[in-house]
Each structure stands twice: as structure tokens, then as C-alpha cells.
Image (cartoon, rainbow, N blue to C red):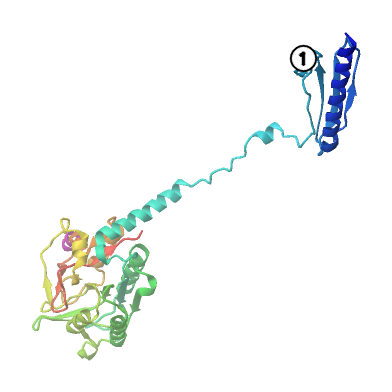
């Protein structure tokens, strides 16, 4: 190589050194320049460390005298500062388990939803998000103050009344607080209970009245009575006539009222209906129109102590599986067994002059 060539190479190396020095000073990088003989390749080797001291790398480039392109001779190795190592277990994503819902709880929810749908379908506009209020007056008279040959005490009415109360509270839509239960009441007790119901019940509510005890039918007058615990067989002043009961049935502003009497009820105010089973009538149609109905054990002057009527009535209500049971359907179920096992024929019909509009009392089964 001639002097001019050597001069040119030295000049070029000097220019590279100056430029790189300026660059290095501005970037905070140390450098080193090596020049060799004319037969060798002018080599430029440098190393640098970035400001964070986390990545360190080195580089070597060759400068050929006859070429203007600087080619990398070696690959650039990288060193990465160790970080928190991730184990194979940690690489596996953590999935939060889905909370299990038991089949039992789903079934229970479905039953609630189905019941609500059923209530809407069967009660229509009268369903306000809950079962309508059902009230009951349940009376049982076993012990009579004037116990004797003319009016003997009874063994079963109070127990029958208790069975009936427990049944409607536990299995039908009667809240315990809405049930008045009277055992061996005197006349004033029964009248007071009627007065309380008249003040408490609204036109959206339903009322069930159950009476088990002595009754009396004056056939000459076609007039019936309930005999409370203080009834005197020689004086009717403490008796409760059917007309008084009828007046209260008309005065209590319930949507539906059903009277179940295990005693006679006067024919003059009781309009018996033919035996029917309302399978063709929709519950909504029966519930839509108000009703005042009565179901009685028969027309005997005195009912027997052990009542077939009440026993069959309770058993049919216990065996019932229909969520909505009209009173006329209940009577249809008890008529044959009571008639076949009693000297009395049960009756069902409208209590006249009390505001019956053609509907029917509906027993709503809750469990």
C-alpha cells in the first residue's frame, strides 16, 4: 500500500475516532479504537453499558479499506439480569372454581316460580304478588254448662276443631295469626269474634268459619240454632240463631266466605245446590265473583257425638293434592262417604241474602 493509501486510512480512522468520541461522551459510553498495519483490517472494538445497568452488551465491527459498508463480524450477545423465576406450577393459570348449586335448591326455586305462575293464572287480577289473606273462625263446643238429658256434653267437637285448625294452618293458606280458635265458648265469645272479623277483614280477603257442637233445628219454624257452651235447653236467650250468623256473613266484607257447620242449618236461609264437581270451570272464574256458601252435616235436630262428616272432611283435605280446591269440589268428595255412613245427608249451597255473586271459596294448598 502507498503512502497516500496509508494516509487515507489514518485519516479515516481519525475521523471515526473523533465522531465516536463525541457520540460516546454524549451517551455516557466508554470506547476503544485499535488500528493495525496496512495488511490488516482496521478494527473497531467497543463495549458499553446502558444507564440502568441491567443490559450489558459488546460489539465488534470490521472496517475494510476498500469498502464503505461496515459489517458486523459477530453476533451481539445479551445478558439479562435475573428476575423472579416462574415455576411450572405458577405458569398454570389459576381458575376460581364455580360455586356449585345443588339440585335441591334448583328444584325449590322452580317450585316457587311455578307456584307464582299458577297463582297468577288462577287468581288473575286478584293476585297481588302474594297469596290473598285467609282468615278463619274455628269453634269447638264439647262441655255444656247445662249438661243433662236434654243437652249432653260431647267428647269430640273440641278435638275435631283442633285437628281442623292444625290442618288449615299447616297445609293451606291460613296464617296462624289470622285464625281465631274458640273452645267451649259462650254466646258472647262467638259474637265478639264475629265483630272482630268484621273490623279486620277487607274485600280482598277470604273467610272460613268452622263450627262443631250441638245445633238445633226447629222444624215447625224451619229455623236453626247453634248452641254455645252456656246454652240453656229451657231458654233460647243464649242460643245463636242462624239468622244472626247469616247477618254476619253478609256484613263481613270478605271476597269469599265459607261456613262449614257440623250442625244443622235452617233451610229458610240456606239454598241447597245440586251436587256438582267444577272440573270444567276455571279457578279464575270461580274466584273472580264473590261467594257466600255453606256446607253442613245435614238436617238432623241433634247431631251424633262422633261425627262422620267432620272425620271425612278432614281426611279429604289431608289427602288433597290439588293446589286450588273449590269448596264445591271438596263437598263432591265427601258427599258419598258421609251419606253412606251416616243417617244424615250433607248439604252444600248458597246462604241467601248475603251477597253471593256466583263464585266459590278456594282452598289454596301451600304444602
Q: Report the residue at 9% width, 84% height from top.
A: 221
Determine the image quadrant of residue 220.
bottom left
Could you tell me which secondary element the residue under label 1 belongs to? loop
Using the image, determine if residue 290 lies above or below residue 18: below
Residue at label 1? 67
Foreground: 287 or 34? 34
Location of the C terminus (image quadrant): bottom left
- In the rendered image, is residue 334 in sight? no
Q: Which residues are magenta?
A: 335-339
Decide whether the magenta segment is chiefly helix, strand or loop. Answer: helix
Taking 360 as reference, is 111 left or right? right
Using the image, determine if residue 72 lies above or below residue 246: above
Q: Report the residue at 58% width, 43% height from top.
A: 96
Q: Report the residue at 64% width, 34% height from top.
A: 92
Number of marks present in the image shown: 1
Taking 10 as reference, is 241 left or right? left
Residue 79 is covered by the magenta coloring = no
Q: Position of residue 277 (x, y in %)?
A: 16, 59
Location of the N terminus (image quadrant): top right
Q: Position of residue 287 (x, y in %)?
A: 22, 65
- The residue most toward the front is 4
Determine the image quadrant of residue 46.
top right
- In the rendered image, is residue 321 in sight? yes
- The residue most toward the left is 220
Foreground: 61 or 293? 61
Determine the image quadrant of residue 19.
top right
Q: Position of residue 67 (x, y in %)?
A: 77, 14
Q: Report the residue at 12% width, 62% height from top.
A: 275
Q: Position of residue 256 (x, y in %)?
A: 23, 71
Foreground: 188 or 142? 188
Foreground: 145 or 23? 23
Using the image, determine if residue 122 lies above or below residue 269: above
Amino acid at each position: 500500500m502507498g503512502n497516500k493509501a496509508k494516509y487515507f486510512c489514518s485519516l479515516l480512522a481519525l475521523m471515526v475516532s473523533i465522531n465516536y468520541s463525541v457520540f460516546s461522551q454524549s451517551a455516557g459510553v466508554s470506547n476503544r479504537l485499535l488500528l493495525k498495519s496496512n495488511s490488516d483490517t482496521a478494527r473497531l472494538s467497543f463495549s458499553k453499558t446502558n444507564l440502568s445497568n441491567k443490559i450489558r452488551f459488546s460489539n465488534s465491527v470490521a472496517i475494510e479499506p476498500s469498502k464503505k459498508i461496515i459489517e458486523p463480524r459477530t453476533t451481539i450477545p445479551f445478558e439479562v439480569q435475573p428476575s423472579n423465576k416462574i415455576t411450572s406450577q405458577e405458569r398454570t393459570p389459576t381458575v376460581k372454581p364455580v360455586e356449585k348449586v345443588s339440585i335441591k335448591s334448583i328444584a325449590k326455586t322452580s317450585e316457587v316460580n311455578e307456584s307464582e305462575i299458577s297463582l297468577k293464572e288462577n287468581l288473575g287480577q286478584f293476585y297481588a304478588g302474594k297469596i290473598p289473606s285467609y282468615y278463619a273462625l274455628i269453634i269447638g263446643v264439647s262441655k255444656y254448662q247445662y249438661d243433662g238429658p236434654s243437652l249432653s256434653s260431647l267428647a269430640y267437637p273440641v278435638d275435631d276443631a283442633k285437628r281442623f285448625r292444625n290442618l288449615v294452618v299447616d297445609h293451606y293458606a291460613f296464617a296462624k295469626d289470622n285464625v281465631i280458635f274458640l273452645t267451649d265458648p259462650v254466646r258472647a265469645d262467638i259474637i265478639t269474634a264475629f265483630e272482630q272479623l268484621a273490623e279486620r277483614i277487607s274485600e280482598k280477603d277470604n273467610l272460613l268459619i268452622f263450627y262443631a257442637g250441638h245445633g238445633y233445628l226447629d222444624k215447625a219454624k224451619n229455623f236453626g240454632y247453634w248452641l254455645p257452651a252456656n246454652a240453656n235447653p229451657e231458654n233460647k236467650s243464649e242460643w245463636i240463631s242462624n239468622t244472626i250468623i247469616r247477618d254476619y256473613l253478609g256484613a263481613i266484607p270478605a271476597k269469599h266466605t265459607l261456613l262449614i257447620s257440623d250442625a244443622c242449618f235452617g233451610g229458610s236461609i240456606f239454598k241447597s245446590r245440586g251436587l256438582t264437581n267444577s272440573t270444567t270451570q276455571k279457578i279464575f272464574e270461580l274466584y273472580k265473583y264473590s261467594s257466600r256458601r255453606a256446607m253442613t252435616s245435614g238436617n238432623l235436630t241433634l247431631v251424633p257425638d262422633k261425627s262422620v262428616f267432620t272425620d271425612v272432611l278432614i281426611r279429604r283435605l289431608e289427602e288433597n293434592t290439588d293446589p286450588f280446591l273449590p269448596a264445591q269440589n271438596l263437598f263432591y268428595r265427601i258427599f258419598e262417604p258421609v251419606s253412606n255412613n251416616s243417617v244424615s245427608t250433607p248439604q252444600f249451597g248458597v246462604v241467601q241474602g248475603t251477597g253471593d255473586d256466583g263464585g266459590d271459596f278456594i282452598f289454596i294448598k301451600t304444602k
